[in-house]
Amino acid sequence: MKNVPATLAAELDARVPGTVRTRASSAEFTTYRCGGSFAVLVRVDRLADLSALAPVFAAASDVEVLVIGRGSNLLVADHGFEGVAIVLGDEFDNVLIHPSHNHVEAGGAVALPVLARRSASSGVAGLEFYVGIPGSVGGAVRMNAGGHGAETKDVIVEARVADLNTGTVEIWAPPALGLGYRCSALGARSVVVGATFAGTPDDPAACAARIDDIVRWRREHQPGGQNAGSVFTNPPGDAAGRLIESCGLKGHRIGSAVVSEKHANFFVAEPGARADDVFALIRDVQHRVAQQTSVQLEPELRLVGFHDERKASS
């Protein structure tokens, strides 16, 4: 990866004034609330902004780009990310319900719990599972987010995807998205600016009751505090949390990062924790589980800027 040229931030800001920050703390944008800075952070509030910025991105084709949703699956190294981070704003934070055919349109920046509750209150069922996922619509599409027996691939109709290099938007149908277990075919310079989901008609009260059940289950079985949900993907036929717990690692800590006592696949960053503490804990748990069970756990968490991040996912 090539570092951001000194002039790039100025070039971006000249195209869309007031949208660019340099050395913004990643802790502001992740649920771990720790980590280093982004060399350049660009807030994109309108689709027209993407078109305006495209020539700069196209010219800087060797600079790494990171599209951020709500940072609920992201850990940035303490020494930072020497690329351009992009966050979506205003125009991408809207939800439009079509109850006549049970479709829901949502911008890429819409919070998934908001999508779930808005859909439920309009009598569109099937999206309730999103209430327990603290990510964005864009992140859900990129990672095929899921829970409680459902995944994004089960409910998505289409995604609207912008190419950073051209500013153009294309409609991607589910086959083109290539949605798999916490993965998709979307590249680093593909930005999900919106998506349409299909539900089924139901009584809003029944939808609300299912949402309440999911929220209740989450509170009972998953920790609060500064965490990013599941750290590892589940290996075939097993659960990462069960494996970690079977190795006696609940409560195991490195620095101020600790394996949750409530759910072993959740790692909590206590106040004052460093991103490098969390990363060291990930590597250590991987090593211990592999030693004791011969299973190599693979991170679901996106690890950015760590020099030896490949070791954590190998």
Image (cartoon, rainbow, N blue to C red):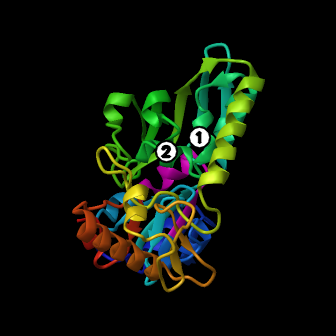
Q: 150 or 77: which is nearer to us?
A: 150
Residue 101 falls inside the magenta stretch: no
Residue 288, given in percent of the width and then of the height, sits at 31, 73
Instruction: Look at the picture and state if 128 lies above or below 282.
Output: above
* First-in-chain label (1 vs 2): 1
Q: Say which element carries label 2.
A: helix
How would you classify the magenta stretch by its main secondary structure? helix
Q: What residue type is labelled 1?
A: Tyr
Q: Can you identify the residue that label 1 sits on?
A: 130
Does the stretch in magenta take in 53? yes
Q: Are marks 1 and 2 in contact (CB under 8 Å)?
A: yes
Residues drawn in magenta: 41-55
Would you say 149 lies left or right of 123 here? left
Q: Classify 10 Å Cα crowding around label 2: few (below 14), some (14-19), many (20 and above).
A: many
* Disc 1, SS: helix
User: Can residue 89 be seen at all in this image of the molecule?
Assistant: no
- Quadrant of residue 188 in the image? bottom left
| Residue 140, numbered label | 2
Find residue 92 and report its image quarter: top right
